[in-house]
Image: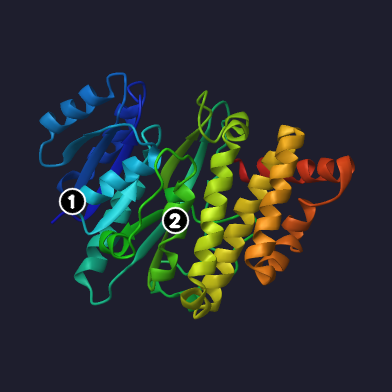
Amino acid sequence: MKLLSIAIPSYNSEAYMRKCIESLLVGGEDVEILIVNDGSKDKTAEIADEYQAKYPSIVKAIHKENGGHGSAVNAGLEQATGLYFKVVDSDDWVKESAYMEILKTLREVVAGDTTLDMLISNFVYEKEGEKKHKVMRYKHALPQNKIFTWDEVKHFYKGQYILMHSVIYRTQLLKDCGLKLPEHTFYVDNLFVFEPLPYVKTMYYLDVNFYRYYIGREGQSVNEQVMISRIDQQIKVNKIMLDYIIDKKAEISKQKKLRTYMVNYLEIITVISSVLLIRSGTEENLEKKKELWDCIKKKNSLLYMRLRYGIMGNTMNLPGKGGRKISVEAYKICQRFFKFN
């Protein structure tokens, strides 16, 4: 059995996917690389088949009709045979030294007596045109180099949360919790991280800069204007997260720090939705923002109070044009600090 399965969702990725694949091949026989060709119209399928032919014991090419990022992740998870599961997008890559450290840690954990559910590491924003790259690390919030539980988690900064780039899940945990991401929907990477959390009992944090998250490609899904054009999909994911945290209230409430983290995560996503709707500048989208907050209030008034009257939620709901201007300026400050978009 493989130690780690790595799914690479790929759509029209011929221009950059080789860099991604080559960075993962150094993991050798411990790793299973699942290149998921999501109905590409370029040479993505040929490149996937080429690597499978060259590395038949490591690489598997999966070809499917186009269903979007979530659908590609689902396909990778369905065919994963490794003990652990990671998603690496086709325009990203990993750092070799950190990769070796992660594989070493997973080997040691598997040989031990305690089952590990989630391994967390740092990721680096590789933003086009910038020489200095922002590193998202968690050493102030998480114990290092040991298995720990939610009780030992400390405080996360506002605007900081564990992304898909940070996380490696135990494969069977993902299958047992029934994770299935929506098709033809962007921004489902948030659901990939969010929905398994109530099932996570044990974690391990390695302070290594493993994942290199590339930002700056034209048409990329995290480009602000692209996000505004796809705002309905952002809202869809936002509402799925809202429903999930309400539906799982009994399980989440048993772990105070888990609940705090998940509510804070939902708050961040709701703030992002809100500020993008404000940034669009249209009356239609301002109405969608009101509808989103009304939806939260209707579904759970206590959760609404927590989100609406927190620092970030309150900033997103200041009245009038002046209030919206303050909201946007607060968002820009976060952009500069955290280097997203």
Q: Residue at x 53, y 61 (%)?
A: 243
Please tell me which residue lies in front, 163 or 38. 38
* 77 displayed left or right of 275: left
Q: In which quarter of the image is residue 203?
A: bottom left
- Whether residue 120 appears in this view of the structure is yes
Q: Where is residue 43 in the image (x, y as percent from the top left)?
A: 27, 19
Give the number of the disc on residue 30: 1
Q: Relative to 202, does residue 225 appear above or below in the rendering? A: above
Q: What residue type is labelled 2?
A: Val
Residue at disc 2, secondary structure:
helix
Q: Which residue is drawn at 50% across and 62% down?
A: 244
Q: Residue at x 52, y 73 (%)?
A: 249
**In the image, farthest residue toward the top:** 42
Give the number of the disc on residue 193: 2
Callout in the foreground (2, 1): 2
Q: Position of residue 292 (x, y in %)?
A: 66, 51
Figure quadrant of the N terminus? bottom left
Figure quadrant of the C terminus? top right
Q: What residue type is labelled 1?
A: Asp
